[in-house]
Amino acid sequence: MTATIVLLPGDGIGPEITAATLRVLERVATFAYDERTFGGASIDADGTALTDEVLDACRRADAVLLAAVGGPRWDTTDPDAPRPEQGLLGLRKGLGLYANLRPVRALEALYTASPLRAEVIARTDLLVVRELTGGIYFGARGREGDRAFDTCEYTVGEIERIARTAFGAARSRVTSVDKANVLESSRLWREVVSRVHREEFPNVELEHLLVDNAAMQLIAAPRHFDVILAENMFGDILSDEAAMLTGSIGMLPSASLGADAPGLFEPVHGSAPDIAGQGTANPLAMILSAAMMLRHGLGMAEQAAAVESAVDRALDAGLRTRDLGGDATTQEATEAVLDRLA
């Protein structure tokens, strides 16, 4: 039976990198596609970033492939105005996608593209496991007179399930990140992670780092890390920081997974409205997100490995988009990957 993939091109460079990625996917397998409006484009068309119809389509699909959302035209400080990012939060919550996986691998071909020295980033290969449906992004919020508030809340069950995901993905070590010296939610986080480790995963090493120290060590000694386990906001920030280890945020894919729902696969970068329509966007993070979809969402590990290998070999052969210090266009980058899938 042919798998159905919901496509959410979104905004900015989203449609361009989606088209590039479809060319790669069509080389390795046959799928049924259901393209839908999402993010800012959906606000323009329907007044909301995520309609009920689109959410229902995503629930029925085998996987969801998202490009990017957002842009200056929808930026606002009005708490009642719709924002593209609300579509992301609604999709994650609506599908129950509590685990976000963001692999960070420094490729030798791109050592010089990173602002860090090659000897610092060499052989870095880590995974950020970010809790996705709890914390301050989903807590109570509001304004009362001259006061604004955002509430960070976590339950034991939410922490247990993301901790199990992190320990299950680890080769040797999990580094759990919190702010337990200040935040009560972080103290609960540390207690629960420690118990899950002790009772269920004693053969995996566990260390706890305060988030400020973790941010420093991620730059000073990135090879130290295997799996970084973090709550929603900390994971969001640290994974973007980790992009500098790869040379560009245009190289980072991600997968958002839940218990029974289809997974959501998307590049970590944003919609880059400043270069939208110019044909210069780096499609590699989107292509690598599709590879994660093949592996984690559709059980097609062989095809996923083929796509990842094609990207690596294209970079080894000299492919460089503008964000990587070169001048390759979106089309040229796509052709370079396709040439190595032949």
Image: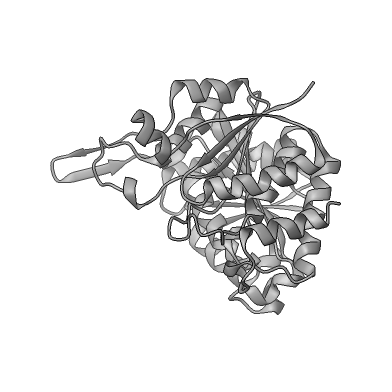
Q: What x and y, as percent, mark residue 210?
A: 52, 58
Residue 226 pos. (x, y %): 71, 56
Judge whether residue 243 can be spotted in this image: yes
Quarter assignment of residue 86: top left
Q: Between 184 and 32, which is closer to the camera in this rendering?
A: 32
Depicted 171 relative to depicted 44: above or below: below
State how the image is colored.
Answer: one colour
The part of the image, by quadrant, that contains residue 311 is bottom right
Q: Is residue 291 visible?
A: no
Which of 130/75 is in front? 75
Quarter occupied by the N terminus:
top right
Side (left or right) of 112 relative to 41: right
Q: Is residue 273 left or right of residue 293?
A: left
Q: Is residue 201 above or below residue 275?
A: above
Figure disc tally: 0
Q: Residue at x 62, y 45 (%)?
A: 19
Q: Nearer the viewer, residue 329 or 61?
A: 329
Left/right placement of residue 126 relative to residue 38 reads right
- Percent x, y for residue 246? 65, 65
Q: Is residue 103 left or right of residue 159?
A: right
- Front-lying residue, 14 or 202: 14
Residue drawn 37% across and 28% down?
46
